[in-house]
Image (cartoon, rainbow, N blue to C red):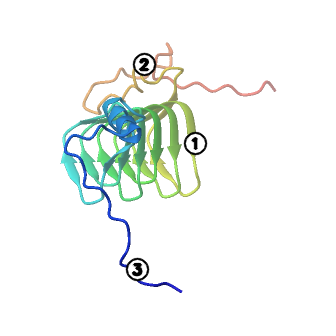
Amino acid sequence: MFTKNNKTPAAPPPEPMQKPVPAQDAIRGAASKPAARAASIICADMKINGSVISEGALQIDGIVDGDVSATDITIGASGQITGEVKAEVVKVKGRIKGSIRARKVELETGAHVKGDIVHSSLQIQSNAVFEGQVKHADDPLRETGPVAAAPASESKPALSSAAPGPYSISSSSPPS
C-alpha cells in the first residue's frame, strides 16, 4: 500500500532574506492591533493581598484580600474575595465578604455573600447564601451605598409618646 520512495523532491533551501508571505503579514498586523480582550484569570492556587483593577473581564478562582474592580467579574466556586467588588456584571459562585456594586448581580447556586449589594438587576438562585442589605439603584456604580447602622455606643434620643420622633413606633387599630 505504501512504499518507501527515495526519490522525493528536495525542498529548495530557504533564502536568507525572503519576502514575508501575506499570511505572515496578517499575523504580524493582528498582533500589533488591540484585539478583543480575554478574561484575566486569578487561578485557584493564587492569593493576592491588595486591590485588583482590570479594564476587561476578570475570572477569580483564587483568593483576593482587597477591592476588585473590572467591567465583568466572575467569582468561581473556589474563588474568595474580602473587600468591595465593583463591575458592570458580577457573577458569584464562590465567596464574597464585602459589598457588591454592579448593574447586574447574579448569585449562583453555592454562592456565599456576606455584605451589602447595590444593583440595577439582581438574581439569586436556589441554595445561594446572602447576608446583608440590598439596594436597587438606576446607576449603582455612581450612587452611594446603603447607610450603615449607627454603632451601639452612640447615644440615641429617648422615645417619647408625646412627640413622635425618628425612633417612635405607632400602631393603629381598626375602628370599632
The kind of secondary structure element at disc 3 is loop
Give the vertical position of 18 relative to 145 (above or below).
below
Horizontal arrangement in the rendering, residue 27 relative to residue 91 (left or right): left
Give the vertical position of 60 relative to 83 (above or below).
below
Please provide percent x and percent y for residue 122: 56, 37
Q: How many labels does the image show?
A: 3
Q: Of label 3 and label 1, which has the lower sequence position?
A: 3
Give the vertical position of 176 relative to 127 (above or below).
above
Quarter of the view holding residue 68: top left
Identify the residue under disc 2: 143
The furthest residue to the right: 176
The furthest residue to the front: 7
Q: Of label 1 and label 2, which has the lower sequence position?
A: 1
Residue type beneath disc 1: Gln
- Count residues near mark 3 (Cα–Cα under 10 Å), then give few for <14, some for 14-19, many for 20+: few
Please provide percent x and percent y for residue 172: 67, 25
Nearer to us of marks 3 and 1 is 3
Give the numbered dot on residue 123.
1
- Count residues near mark 2 (Cα–Cα under 10 Å), then give few for <14, some for 14-19, many for 20+: few
Please provide percent x and percent y for residue 32: 31, 31
Please provide percent x and percent y for residue 88: 46, 30
The kind of secondary structure element at disc 1 is strand
- Count residues near mark 1 (Cα–Cα under 10 Å), then give few for <14, some for 14-19, many for 20+: few
Residue at screen point 54% across, 58% down:
127
Identify the residue under disc 3: 5
